[in-house]
Protein backbone atom coordinates (compact mmCIF):
# COMPACT_ATOMS: atom_id res chain seq x y z
CA UNK A 1 0.00 0.00 0.00
CA UNK A 2 1.45 3.36 -1.04
CA UNK A 3 0.60 6.27 1.22
CA UNK A 4 1.27 9.97 1.03
CA UNK A 5 1.09 11.71 4.39
CA UNK A 6 0.54 15.46 4.42
CA UNK A 7 3.15 16.35 7.02
CA UNK A 8 6.86 16.00 7.71
CA UNK A 9 6.32 15.62 11.46
CA UNK A 10 7.99 12.26 12.27
CA UNK A 11 5.32 11.47 14.85
CA UNK A 12 2.61 11.60 12.19
CA UNK A 13 4.62 9.46 9.77
CA UNK A 14 5.29 6.96 12.51
CA UNK A 15 1.61 6.85 13.49
CA UNK A 16 0.61 5.99 9.91
CA UNK A 17 3.36 3.38 9.44
CA UNK A 18 2.62 1.61 12.71
CA UNK A 19 -1.15 1.64 12.41
CA UNK A 20 -1.18 0.28 8.86
CA UNK A 21 1.74 -2.11 9.35
CA UNK A 22 -0.42 -5.08 8.27
CA UNK A 23 -0.69 -3.59 4.75
CA UNK A 24 3.08 -3.23 4.41
CA UNK A 25 2.88 0.50 3.75
CA UNK A 26 5.35 2.61 1.83
CA UNK A 27 4.98 6.08 3.26
CA UNK A 28 6.01 9.35 1.60
CA UNK A 29 6.03 12.48 3.74
CA UNK A 30 4.75 15.47 1.79
CA UNK A 31 5.15 19.03 3.06
CA UNK A 32 1.72 20.52 2.33
CA UNK A 33 -0.19 23.47 3.73
CA UNK A 34 -3.09 22.52 5.99
CA UNK A 35 -5.12 25.45 4.67
CA UNK A 36 -6.25 26.27 8.22
CA UNK A 37 -4.64 28.10 11.15
CA UNK A 38 -1.44 26.66 12.67
CA UNK A 39 -3.60 25.99 15.70
CA UNK A 40 -7.11 24.96 14.68
CA UNK A 41 -9.72 25.93 17.27
CA UNK A 42 -12.80 23.85 16.48
CA UNK A 43 -13.69 20.35 15.36
CA UNK A 44 -14.67 21.71 11.96
CA UNK A 45 -11.39 23.56 11.42
CA UNK A 46 -9.38 20.54 12.61
CA UNK A 47 -11.23 18.16 10.26
CA UNK A 48 -10.80 20.59 7.37
CA UNK A 49 -7.06 20.72 8.02
CA UNK A 50 -6.86 16.92 7.96
CA UNK A 51 -8.87 16.76 4.71
CA UNK A 52 -6.74 19.40 3.02
CA UNK A 53 -3.54 17.63 4.02
CA UNK A 54 -4.84 14.27 2.75
CA UNK A 55 -5.98 15.63 -0.63
CA UNK A 56 -2.89 17.76 -1.20
CA UNK A 57 -0.52 14.93 -0.26
CA UNK A 58 -2.25 12.55 -2.68
CA UNK A 59 -2.25 15.16 -5.45
CA UNK A 60 1.52 15.56 -5.10
CA UNK A 61 2.27 11.84 -5.49
CA UNK A 62 1.21 8.61 -7.23
CA UNK A 63 0.24 7.02 -3.91
CA UNK A 64 -2.89 4.91 -3.43
CA UNK A 65 -4.07 7.01 -0.52
CA UNK A 66 -3.48 10.46 0.91
CA UNK A 67 -3.54 10.73 4.68
CA UNK A 68 -3.94 13.93 6.68
CA UNK A 69 -3.62 14.36 10.43
CA UNK A 70 -4.42 17.55 12.29
CA UNK A 71 -4.29 18.51 15.95
CA UNK A 72 -6.68 21.09 17.34
CA UNK A 73 -8.28 22.46 20.45
CA UNK A 74 -11.99 22.83 21.08
CA UNK A 75 -14.58 23.45 23.76
CA UNK A 76 -16.83 20.42 23.65
CA UNK A 77 -20.47 20.33 24.64
CA UNK A 78 -20.91 18.49 27.90
CA UNK A 79 -17.30 18.73 29.08
CA UNK A 80 -15.53 21.52 30.98
CA UNK A 81 -12.54 23.49 29.75
CA UNK A 82 -10.54 23.30 26.56
CA UNK A 83 -9.67 19.93 25.01
CA UNK A 84 -6.93 18.72 22.72
CA UNK A 85 -8.50 16.88 19.79
CA UNK A 86 -7.01 15.18 16.77
CA UNK A 87 -8.57 14.15 13.49
CA UNK A 88 -7.46 12.12 10.53
CA UNK A 89 -8.65 12.04 6.94
CA UNK A 90 -7.95 9.51 4.21
CA UNK A 91 -8.68 9.92 0.52
CA UNK A 92 -8.22 7.72 -2.53
CA UNK A 93 -8.92 10.69 -4.81
CA UNK A 94 -12.51 9.60 -5.18
CA UNK A 95 -13.88 9.55 -1.69
CA UNK A 96 -12.66 10.91 1.61
CA UNK A 97 -13.25 9.49 5.08
CA UNK A 98 -12.57 11.00 8.50
CA UNK A 99 -11.92 9.61 11.95
CA UNK A 100 -11.11 11.06 15.33
CA UNK A 101 -8.47 10.30 17.91
CA UNK A 102 -8.75 10.68 21.65
CA UNK A 103 -9.82 13.83 23.47
CA UNK A 104 -7.57 15.10 26.25
CA UNK A 105 -8.60 17.87 28.65
CA UNK A 106 -5.96 20.59 28.82
CA UNK A 107 -4.96 21.91 32.25
CA UNK A 108 -6.38 25.40 32.80
CA UNK A 109 -2.97 27.13 32.83
CA UNK A 110 -2.11 25.73 29.42
CA UNK A 111 -5.63 26.20 28.10
CA UNK A 112 -5.58 29.89 29.03
CA UNK A 113 -2.45 30.56 27.00
CA UNK A 114 -3.78 28.62 24.03
CA UNK A 115 -7.11 30.44 24.32
CA UNK A 116 -5.16 33.73 24.24
CA UNK A 117 -3.78 32.81 20.82
CA UNK A 118 -0.69 30.65 21.42
CA UNK A 119 -0.03 27.32 19.72
CA UNK A 120 -0.23 24.28 21.97
CA UNK A 121 3.14 22.79 20.97
CA UNK A 122 5.24 25.85 21.99
CA UNK A 123 3.16 26.36 25.16
CA UNK A 124 3.80 22.76 26.19
CA UNK A 125 7.54 23.17 25.49
CA UNK A 126 7.66 26.37 27.51
CA UNK A 127 5.80 24.83 30.41
CA UNK A 128 7.79 21.60 30.45
CA UNK A 129 11.21 22.94 29.47
CA UNK A 130 11.21 20.58 26.49
CA UNK A 131 12.12 21.23 22.88
CA UNK A 132 9.73 19.81 20.29
CA UNK A 133 7.38 17.79 22.49
CA UNK A 134 4.88 17.87 19.59
CA UNK A 135 7.35 15.73 17.62
CA UNK A 136 7.81 13.33 20.53
CA UNK A 137 5.36 12.13 23.20
CA UNK A 138 3.14 15.15 22.73
CA UNK A 139 0.61 16.62 25.09
CA UNK A 140 -1.29 13.34 24.97
CA UNK A 141 1.75 11.55 26.43
CA UNK A 142 2.77 14.13 28.99
CA UNK A 143 -0.73 14.73 30.33
CA UNK A 144 -1.40 11.01 30.81
CA UNK A 145 2.00 10.09 32.32
CA UNK A 146 2.63 8.07 29.17
CA UNK A 147 -0.53 5.98 29.32
CA UNK A 148 -0.87 7.08 25.71
CA UNK A 149 1.36 9.25 23.52
CA UNK A 150 0.99 11.34 20.38
CA UNK A 151 1.97 8.52 18.01
CA UNK A 152 -0.56 6.15 19.50
CA UNK A 153 -3.25 8.81 19.75
CA UNK A 154 -2.83 9.87 16.11
CA UNK A 155 -2.80 6.21 15.13
CA UNK A 156 -6.34 5.84 16.49
CA UNK A 157 -7.47 8.63 14.18
CA UNK A 158 -5.73 6.95 11.22
CA UNK A 159 -7.39 3.62 12.01
CA UNK A 160 -10.81 5.22 12.40
CA UNK A 161 -10.52 7.08 9.10
CA UNK A 162 -9.34 3.98 7.23
CA UNK A 163 -12.41 1.85 7.98
CA UNK A 164 -14.31 2.63 4.77
CA UNK A 165 -11.27 1.68 2.65
CA UNK A 166 -10.48 -1.63 4.28
CA UNK A 167 -13.96 -3.03 5.08
CA UNK A 168 -17.21 -3.46 3.15
CA UNK A 169 -19.43 -2.09 5.89
CA UNK A 170 -19.72 1.40 4.51
CA UNK A 171 -20.66 0.27 1.00
CA UNK A 172 -24.26 -0.70 1.69
CA UNK A 173 -27.26 0.88 3.39
CA UNK A 174 -27.78 -1.98 5.87
O1 LIG B 1 4.25 19.69 10.96
P1 LIG B 1 2.80 19.51 11.27
O2 LIG B 1 2.19 18.38 10.54
O3 LIG B 1 2.00 20.78 11.13
O4 LIG B 1 2.77 19.05 12.82
P2 LIG B 1 2.28 19.81 14.13
O5 LIG B 1 3.00 19.20 15.29
O6 LIG B 1 2.36 21.28 13.96
O7 LIG B 1 0.79 19.33 14.27
P3 LIG B 1 -0.58 20.04 13.89
O8 LIG B 1 -0.32 21.18 12.95
O9 LIG B 1 -1.53 18.99 13.46
O10 LIG B 1 -1.07 20.54 15.29
C1 LIG B 1 -1.57 21.87 15.49
C2 LIG B 1 -0.97 22.47 16.73
O11 LIG B 1 -1.29 21.67 17.85
C3 LIG B 1 -0.11 21.25 18.52
N1 LIG B 1 -0.33 19.90 19.00
C4 LIG B 1 -1.22 19.02 18.56
N2 LIG B 1 -1.15 17.89 19.25
C5 LIG B 1 -0.18 18.07 20.14
C6 LIG B 1 0.39 17.29 21.15
O12 LIG B 1 -0.02 16.05 21.40
N3 LIG B 1 1.38 17.82 21.87
C7 LIG B 1 1.83 19.05 21.67
N4 LIG B 1 1.33 19.86 20.74
C8 LIG B 1 0.36 19.37 20.00
C9 LIG B 1 0.99 21.33 17.45
O13 LIG B 1 2.26 21.49 17.99
C10 LIG B 1 0.56 22.56 16.69
O14 LIG B 1 0.96 23.71 17.42
MG1 LIG C 1 1.38 22.36 12.38
Image (spheres, rainbow, N blue to C red):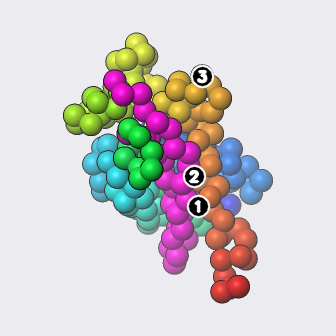
**Which element carries disc 1, helix, strand or loop?**
helix
Residue named by callout 2: 157
- Between residues 23 and 102, which one lies in front from this camera angle? 102
Please give the name of the residue rendered at 41% of the width and 40% of the height, measured from the top-left corner.
80
Q: Say above or below: 110 vs 65.
A: above
Numbered disc total: 3
**Which element carries disc 2, helix, strand or loop?**
helix
Q: Residues within 10 Å of mark 1 (few under 14, many from 20)?
A: many
Question: Would you say 172 lies left or right of 58 here?
Answer: right
Residue 41 percent location from the top left of the image:
32, 48
* Residues at marks 1 and 2, CA–CA distance in whole angstroms: 6 Å
Specify the segment rendered in magenta. 82-109
* Residues at marks 3 and 2, CA–CA distance in whole angstroms: 21 Å
Q: Residues within 10 Å of mark 3 (few under 14, many from 20)?
A: few
Residue named by callout 3: 145
**Which element carries disc 3, helix, strand or loop?**
loop
Residue 83 found in image quarter = top left
- Tell us which disc is closer to us: 3 or 2: 3
Magenta-colored stretch includes residue 110: no
Residue 45 percent location from the top left of the image:
34, 56
Q: Could you tell me which quadrant the C terminus lies in?
A: bottom right
Please give the name of the residue rendered at 58% of the width and 27% of the height, measured from the top-left corner.
144
- Between residues 158 and 10, which one lies in front from this camera angle? 158
Residue 90 found in image quarter = bottom right
Res. 139 visible in picture: yes
Looking at the image, which residue sits at the far right? Answer: 22
Q: Say above or below: 114 vs 54.
A: above
Residue 161's tag is 1
Question: Would you say 39 lies left or right of 61 here?
Answer: left
- Tell us which disc is closer to us: 3 or 1: 3
* Residues at marks 3 and 1, CA–CA distance in whole angstroms: 27 Å
Amino acid sequence: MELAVGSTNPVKIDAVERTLERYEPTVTAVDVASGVAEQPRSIEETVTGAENRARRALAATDADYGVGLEGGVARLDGTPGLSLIMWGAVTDGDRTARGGGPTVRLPDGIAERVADGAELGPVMDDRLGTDGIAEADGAAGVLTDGLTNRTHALGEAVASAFGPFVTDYYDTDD
